[in-house]
């Protein structure tokens, strides 16, 4: 089946620093990847849609200058949380479409803690 | 945007019991998926089911697209079935999934 990986699986950083999270489709090409955020005991909320070779589309209320997304290839998208604050602490999950079906596959998530 | 409502929000079952989880959505959809989120946060694909009925072992799902609802059946539940079950829909191909709030299931021995 289609496999999506994320790295790192968890990260702790100090307030004011930046953190990069990678999302890779391991056995398929993904022209579109999605980034979600999940707070404890809540559902997944879409942050942005990432298209290979073009600028990401951000959801209302998501600061594009704070959450930088780069989709440089058909198998890799990155999310950089810049100048992180404690309120950015959350579980970040990426997903990708395969080109062969409408089904979406999710990465295992990255747990970010900002101290 | 499209509304996705799941019920019940919480469910406690004894091992061996059966259960039905429901997902209502407010518009016609191109895609509907059921996921199980395990205790480590990983979303596991259960079914891609924009319409019709599918079965996979003890799990089955039915989507009635014309009436805008989907059901997930869990039979002979096991403690490993515990976790949160999400229904998510996609309005059009290539768009992101809209998630319901989930059903939190606890199966006790």
Image (tube, coloured by chain):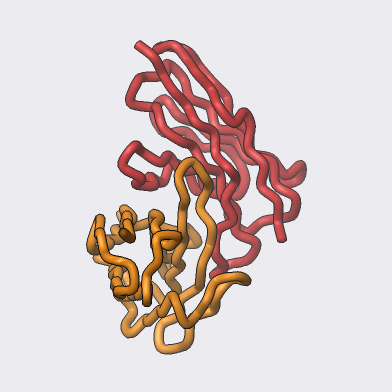
In which quadrant is the N terminus of chain B drawn? bottom right
* Colour in which chain A is drawn: orange
- Observer-nearest of A64 and B76: A64
Q: Quadrant of residue A100?
A: bottom left
Q: Is residue A27 visible?
A: no
Residue drawn at the location 26% of the way across and 64% of the way down: A13
* Colour in which chain B is drawn: red
* Residue B65 placement, left or right of B36: right
Relative height, residue A70 to residue A107 (above, below)? below
- The x and y percentages for residue A97 are 44, 65
- The x and y percentages for residue A90 are 40, 55
Relative height, residue A75 to residue A52 (above, below)? above
Q: Is residue A104 visible?
A: yes
- The x and y percentages for residue B56 are 41, 33
* Residue B29 placement, left or right of B75: right
Relative height, residue A74 to residue A84 (above, below)? below
């Amino acid at each position: 089946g289609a496999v999506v990986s994320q790295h790192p699986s968890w990260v702790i950083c100090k307030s004011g620093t930046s953190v990069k999270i990678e999302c890779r489709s391991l056995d398929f090409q993904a022209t579109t990847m999605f980034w979600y955020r999940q707070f404890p005991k809540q559902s997944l909320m879409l942050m942005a849609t990432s298209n290979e070779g073009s600028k990401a589309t951000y959801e209302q209320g998501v600061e594009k200058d704070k959450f930088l997304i780069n989709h440089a290839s058909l198998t890799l998208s990155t999310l950089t949380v810049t100048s992180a604050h404690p309120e950015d602490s959350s579980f970040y999950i990426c997903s990708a479409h395969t080109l062969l079906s409408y089904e979406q596959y999710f990465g295992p998530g990255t747990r970010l803690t900002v101290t | 945007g499209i509304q996705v409502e799941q019920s019940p929000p919480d469910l406690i079952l004894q091992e061996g019991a059966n259960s039905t989880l429901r997902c209502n959505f407010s518009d016609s959809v191109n895609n509907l998926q059921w996921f199980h989120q395990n205790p480590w946060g990983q979303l596991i694909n259960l079914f891609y089911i924009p319409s019709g009925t599918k079965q996979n072992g003890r799990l089955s799902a039915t989507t009635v697209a014309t009436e805008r609802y989907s059901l997930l059946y869990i039979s002979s539940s096991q403690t490993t079935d515990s976790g949160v079950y999400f229904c998510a829909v996609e309005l059009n191909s290539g768009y992101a999934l809209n998630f319901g709030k989930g059903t939190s299931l606890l199966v006790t021995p």
